Image: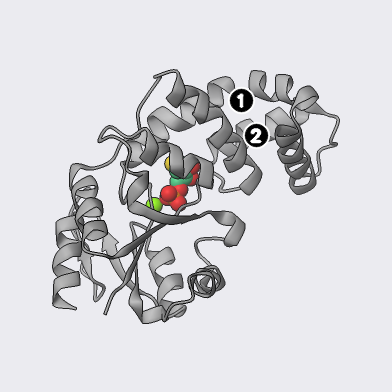
C-alpha cells in the first residue's frame, strides 16, 4: 500500500514552460549582478561560487569566469548543485517582489491537498534546490501549498537519474521502498526509482501518451486512480 508520494516538479506538478520561460530567464538576467555583489559580502554566495570554481576548473577569484560558467550552465539546463543553490537565492527576490508566482497545475494543487488530508505523506524530489522548491509551492498561483509537504530533497542527495539517490531517500524516510510512489515526467528518473524498489507513475502533460508498460497519465486524477487500484 502506498503511504508516501514523492514528486518531481518541472513537467509534473508544474509546467516546463514556467521553469524555462520565466525562472531560467530571470536567473540569467540577474545572475551577474547578484554574484558580483554577493561574492564580497555573502558567505552563502561565496561558498556556492567556490563550488562552481571547483567543478569547472575556473579560478575562485575569477568572478567574470565564474559568471560565464553559470551563464553556460543556465543555457544548457545543467543540474549542477551550486547553480541550483544560487538560482534558488535569486528566485527568492523575484517571488518576494511579485515578479512571478509559482505555476502549479490545478489538478496537482487539488490532489496534493486531497492526498495530504487522506493521511499520505508528501515529499518533493527536484533538481531545483530545497529553497527553490519551497518557493515555488509557497508562492504558488494556488496559494501556499507548503503545509501539505513533509519534506524536500534536491541533488544534495544525488542525481535524479541514479538509483542510489532514491535508496538514500528511502533510508532517510525509514520506509519500505514499495510504499513510496514517485511521480515524474522523465523516464530515466522513473527507471532509477524503480531500480531502488519504488513504484512510479509517469506524467505526460503534453502530447500523446506513449505506448508503454509503465503506469502513465496526463494529470494527478490519473495518479489518484492508480492509488485507488492499489
Ligand atoms: C524548484 S523549481 C525549479 C526547477 C529547476 O530548477 C529544475 O532544474 C527542474 O528540475 P526538476 O527536477 O523539477 O525537473
Ligand atoms: Mg521533471
Is disc 2 surrounded by few (<14), some (14 to 19) or many (20+) residues within 10 Å? Answer: many
The residue that label 2 is drawn on is 70
Does label 2 point to a residue whose CB lies under 8 Å from ligand 1?
no
Alpha-carbon span between mark 1 and mark 2: 8 Å
Element type at mark 1: helix
Precedes in sequence: disc 1 or disc 2: 1
How busy is the neighbourhood of tag 1: few (under 14 within 10 Å), some, or many (20 plus)? some
Image: 182 above or below 33:
below
Please tell me which residue is depicted at 53% across the width and 75% down the height of the picture. 171
State which mark lies toward you, 1 or 2.
Answer: 1
- Residue in the picture at 62% in, 31% down: 71
Residue 133, relative to residue 188: is it above or below?
Answer: above
- Residue 151 lies, in percent from the top left, at 45, 56
The reply to whether callout 1 and callout 2 are in contact (CB within 8 Å) is yes
* Quadrant housing the N terminus: bottom left
For the C terminus, the quadrant is bottom left
Q: Nearer the viewer, residue 171 or 126?
A: 171
Give the x, y percent position of residue 57. Answer: 81, 44
Position in image of residue 33 (x %, y %):
65, 18
Q: Is residue 36 above or below residue 57?
A: above
Is residue 34 found left or right of 141 in the rendered image?
A: right
Q: Is 24 on the left or on the right of 32, as rendered?
A: left
* Residue positioned 41% across, 81% down in the render: 176
Quadrant of the rendered image containing residue 63: top right
Q: Which mark is residue 31?
A: 1
Amino acid at each position: 500500500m502506498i503511504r508516501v508520494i514523492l514528486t518531481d516538479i518541472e513537467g509534473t506538478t508544474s509546467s516546463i514552460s514556467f521553469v524555462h520561460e520565466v525562472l531560467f530567464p530571470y536567473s540569467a538576467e540577474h545572475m551577474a549582478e547578484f554574484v558580483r555583489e554577493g561574492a564580497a559580502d555573502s558567505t552563502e554566495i561565496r561558498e556556492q561560487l567556490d563550488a562552481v570554481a571547483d567543478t569547472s576548473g575556473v579560478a575562485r577569484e575569477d568572478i567574470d569566469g565564474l559568471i560565464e560558467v553559470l551563464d553556460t550552465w543556465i543555457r544548457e539546463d545543467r543540474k549542477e548543485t551550486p547553480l541550483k543553490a544560487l538560482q534558488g537565492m535569486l528566485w527568492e527576490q523575484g517571488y518576494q517582489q511579485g515578479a512571478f508566482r509559482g505555476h502549479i497545475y490545478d489538478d496537482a494543487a487539488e490532489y496534493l491537498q486531497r492526498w495530504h488530508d487522506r493521511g499520505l505523506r508528501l515529499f518533493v524530489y527536484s533538481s531545483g534546490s530545497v529553497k527553490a522548491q519551497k518557493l515555488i509551492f509557497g508562492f504558488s498561483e494556488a496559494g501556499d501549498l507548503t503545509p501539505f509537504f513533509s519534506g524536500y530533497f534536491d541533488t544534495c542527495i544525488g542525481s535524479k537519474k541514479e538509483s542510489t539517490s532514491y535508496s538514500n531517500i528511502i533510508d532517510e524516510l525509514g520506509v519500505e521502498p514499495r510504499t513510496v510512489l514517485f511521480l515524474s515526467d522523465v523516464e530515466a528518473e522513473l527507471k532509477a526509482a524503480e531500480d531502488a524498489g519504488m513504484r512510479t507513475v509517469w506524467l505526460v502533460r503534453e502530447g500523446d501518451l506513449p505506448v508503454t508498460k509503465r503506469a502513465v497519465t496526463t494529470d494527478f486524477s490519473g495518479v489518484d486512480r492508480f492509488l485507488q487500484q492499489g
